[in-house]
Image (cartoon, coloured by chain):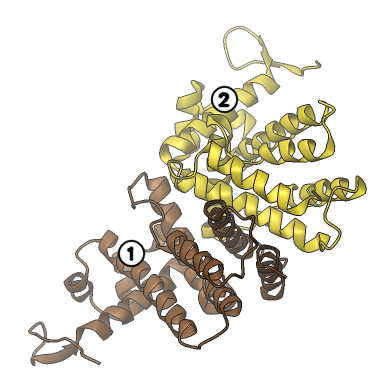
Chain colours: A brown, B yellow
Amino acid sequence: MQRKFAVCYNTDMPKLVDHSERKSHIAEATWRVILKEGMKGATVRKIAQEAGVSLGALRHYFTTQHELLAFAMKLVSDRANARIRDVMALGLPPKELVTRVLMELLPLDENSMAEMEVWFAFVFHHKYAGEDYGGLNDGIYPGIVNLLGHLKKEGLLREELDMDIEAERLYALLDGLALHALLEPKRLDRERILRVLHSHMDSICRE
Amino acid sequence: MQRKFAVCYNTDMPKLVDHSERKSHIAEATWRVILKEGMKGATVRKIAQEAGVSLGALRHYFTTQHELLAFAMKLVSDRANARIRDVMALGLPPKELVTRVLMELLPLDENSMAEMEVWFAFVFHHKYAGEDYGGLNDGIYPGIVNLLGHLKKEGLLREELDMDIEAERLYALLDGLALHALLEPKRLDRERILRVLHSHMDSICRE
């Protein structure tokens, strides 16, 4: 693994600092602050405190709060993508493969629940601040189109389905489940989410 | 229609004031402020200004901002319920009746889009403020259970369906569509939302 190193001159002795590792450390601190304080409490000052770095050091990595939040969000997406690549490498049969990939987009454990919470907070923060964040634009919709295309190519989808509308329906189902699990985690637990997902997969696949 | 009147003594001359009408007027002003400024901008002061009433007069109706927002939210729900009652009174065949009721829960025009925006802002405001707002608790989930029960009683649902999971699936689909329509109104327009809804209804009903 290739890492980028840089020399910092802001202490008595020059130090070799692993920038990409420090950036990840700061992004993780950002998530913890967002989850504790909400997006409106995610100030650069609080994040520096949580990460245990000086405000000056934080500004070395992120010049604005927007840059910092965008970076934290990108890490959410990078992590999900890494998990999905791992699933793809398992060599599963098509229907199981698609189901397992979709599971990575749902809040089924503590980690993915936290990611979902950050994602919703980020999206609504920008929505209600009236800022343009480029729509959802998280690549999930085209990803779902591809997954359904894979099932069709393998001859597993029911013949009569309108692929375009099925992708939209599955996309809405996933984010609706994620939203309800976030707001009502007791009622809609992991087992119940999986029952709905499996039931939907069975309904679109041939017997 | 019965209305409640009260005498106010805070001006030179006693006045007959229609309280329920004034409350609605203030709630509508609240919605406009939320849509313009986001929930964090929906202060009692700004709402008084938007409604064209004094801060003192506003506090006569709502002593805290929380009370005011809860009242505005209740109006959203009352309006949706009134529309649903109108649909129920049309004497439609069961499948059309259920579809039309579900349509009232989706952002298909400017008014219902605004209601949805207020609803999401309210829910996320409380979620990220860490306040207890009693979950979603908007009566939509039990309503969907009833609608599916109606279709089953009429012998219109496919035999093999698990009613409990079907209600959860439809509930998630509706709120997922609402969420995506709110965030990506250009991609997911009225026509596309309706195509997904009709396709889902066809998939759960017998031929």
- Give the x, y percent position of residue B115: 58, 37
Image quadrant holding the C terminus of chain A, namely bottom right
| A81 with respect to B29 (left or right) | left
Report the residue marked by disc 1.
A69
- Give the x, y percent position of residue B172: 65, 56
Along the line of sight, which residue is nearer the eye, A116 or B102?
B102
- Give the x, y percent position of residue A203: 70, 63
Report the residue marked by disc 2.
B57
Residue visible at 45% across and 87% down?
A89
Along the line of sight, which residue is nearer the eye, A182 or A143?
A143
Q: Is residue A206 above or below residue A109?
A: above
Q: Which mark is residue B95?
A: none
Q: Amino acid at mark 1?
A: Leu
- Give the x, y percent position of residue B184: 44, 46
Camera-near label (1 vs 2) is 1
Is residue B123 something one can see in this rendering? Answer: yes
Residue visible at 85% across and 27% down?
B91
Q: CA distance from mark 1 to mark 2?
A: 41 Å
Q: Is residue B198 above or below residue A179?
A: above
| B40 with respect to B145 (left or right) | left
Question: Is disc 2 placed on a helix, strand or loop?
Answer: helix
Image quadrant holding the N terminus of chain A, namely bottom left
Residue visible at 26% across and 63% down?
A67
Q: Mark 2 — on which chain does it sit? A: B
